[in-house]
Amino acid sequence: MSQRETIIEVKDLVKKFGSFTANDRLTFDVYRGEIFGFLGANGAGKTTAMKILSGLSRPTSGKVMVAGIDVSHHPEKVKRKIGYMSQFFSLYNDMTVKENFRFYGGIYGLSAKKIRERTQFYLDKLDMKSYENMLLKNIPLGWKQKLAFSLANIHNPDIIFLDEPTGGVDPITRRQFWELIYEAADQGTTVFVTTHYMDEAEYCERVSIMSEGQIKALGKPKALKEQFGAATMNDVFLKIARNVE
Amino acid sequence: MLPIIFIIPIVQLLVLSYTATFEIKNVRFVVVDQDHSSESRKLIDKFSGSAFFTDMGHLPDYKAAENAVQHDDADQIIVIEPDFEKDLVNEHHAQIQLVTNAINGSAASLMNAYAISIINNFNKEILIKKLPLKFKGMPIQLSSSFWYNPELDYITYMVPGILVLLVTIIAMFLSSMNIVKEKEIGTIEQLNVTPITKFEFIAGKLIPFWIIAMIDLLIGLTLARFVFGIVIVGNPFLLLFVTSVYLVLVLGMGLLVSTLTNTMQQAMFISWFFLVIFILMSGLFTPIESMPVWAQQLNAINPLAYFIKINRMIMLKGSGFADFQRDFYILAAYAVLMLGFATLRYRKRA
């Protein structure tokens, strides 16, 4: 395998809340342009780790470099380089599609012209041209999630973090959503995604599986299936989760 | 939401200005006239003839009158003893009894004062009639004039204070609910992963509400002028200037509450807690001078107290900046402090 550029470097990341250890010495690298699946049962510590990577929360100890920046010391600089989309829909429902683009484009300091270009580009791509002046609250969830993904991408970030982006979305829209993810990855954006759908795990280039705050397995889906002697990622996941119990 | 923001202050101004008055216009009295003489009737006519009193009828005895007060059919009892006229003529000395429902103490003392002034008037007439040559008027002639509000019009006094109240309520609630609302619906999380700076964030919250509250004030001033006929005696631009600084203070307080709380319910209780105390202590309804010393000292942190005072000075007295500059500088420093705290307290963390 050719040497790829490391875009996320995590070494011995520990996050404690009081006496509870949410992340226990996590160590992993993510490469530029990779689709990295970050799996784990509820409460395994995925969201905590993702919040640290995106500068929302500080690690208790360990080294976390994102896009070449130390997150512990310069979280605001990291935020310029990343996009983030949460499992809870968090765009402004009382603004129109276009206004949301303008708002987030403005926050990232894009010029008015650039914002218009990017808005048109995504509305064309999502085939949502006729919705541009509609309030977001009137748009179906699946479409909203695609919009949220586009908005998280508006400033061409190096990395985009997706926290269970397809929760509650129908299979067809999920499929379309993954097409968007592939497209972004093809253009060199690193996609860091958490999910509970194991079919989606198969789409990832590499996955890590967390349990009890630790990474129990990390590798290409195919390699993991061989390693655990399982037919599907679902079985791999269950084996790891069962070992815990 | 937008219509509410503009309609509520208008309703507040119109309703409160007419109702927040200490004048008592309708004192309901009952009479226990045990004399039934022409003098007693004359006295009663004086009461019924007054615009402030309403005659609720004559009752046979004191017990019945007491009942009327008990059932809230009357506020005052006038008891005229038998032989009232006879005593007045023979001894130049007669007695009447005045009983006032004092559940509301300040209202009772007003009713009492009205009644006494009617009785005094009646007294004077008797004296003139009896001693037409000797009576040359009271030894001390009192002549008073009331400055800045010569007709002692309550609305004129209340409106500047109510204007302060309504911009404060709008500004406080819009700002204190806002950030916490974003916390509840989750949009704050998306904002927190962007490179938006704390200063930009707070400015983005402050400016729209500032504009809305300013528009509310302008609407209020227009209504004050055309509905209540209150002309701003001082410089209107000075008033707007002070308001602009005052609003930064109130919005800063609201935003601080919003950054400190986690739910809209908490934010609402906290803002209500402070607003009610600030309003009641502000001198809007009751003069600050008559509050206990500790309460007057507590008003040092009451933004409303400062601004109501300044607003009344500008609108009614025509005061210039120099007349209230100390209060203004306190407001300005307070505004910087609150906004600073709000900015510091806003954490871009999850």
Image: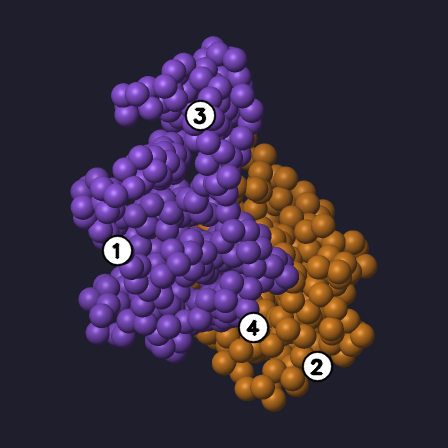
Query: Could you tell me which chain the residue with mark 3 belongs to?
Result: B
Quick check: marks 2 and 4 in contact, CB under 8 Å? no
- In the rendered picture, chain B carries what hue? purple
- Colouring chosen for the image of the structure: by chain
Q: Nearer the viewer, residue B182 or B156?
A: B156
Q: Secondary structure at mark 1?
A: loop
Disc 2 with disc 4 on a shared chain: yes
Q: Tell me where residue B297 appears, x and y as whole percent.
A: 20, 47
B49 w.r.t. B214: above or below: above
Q: Nearer the viewer, residue B116 or A43?
A: B116
Q: CA distance from mark 1 to mark 2?
A: 82 Å
Disc 1 with disc 2 on a shared chain: no
Which mark's residue is nearer the viewer, 1 or 4?
1
Q: Identify the residue under disc 3.
A: B40
Query: Could you tell me which chain the residue with mark 2 belongs to?
Result: A
Q: Secondary structure at mark 2?
A: helix
Q: Identify the residue under disc 4.
A: A104
Mark 2 is on which residue type? Phe
Q: CA distance from mark 3 to mark 4?
A: 83 Å
Query: Could you tell me which chain the residue with mark 1 belongs to?
Result: B
Q: CA distance from mark 1 to mark 4?
A: 70 Å
Q: Identify the residue under disc 1.
A: B143
- Please give left or right for residue B282 compared with residue B191 in the image: left
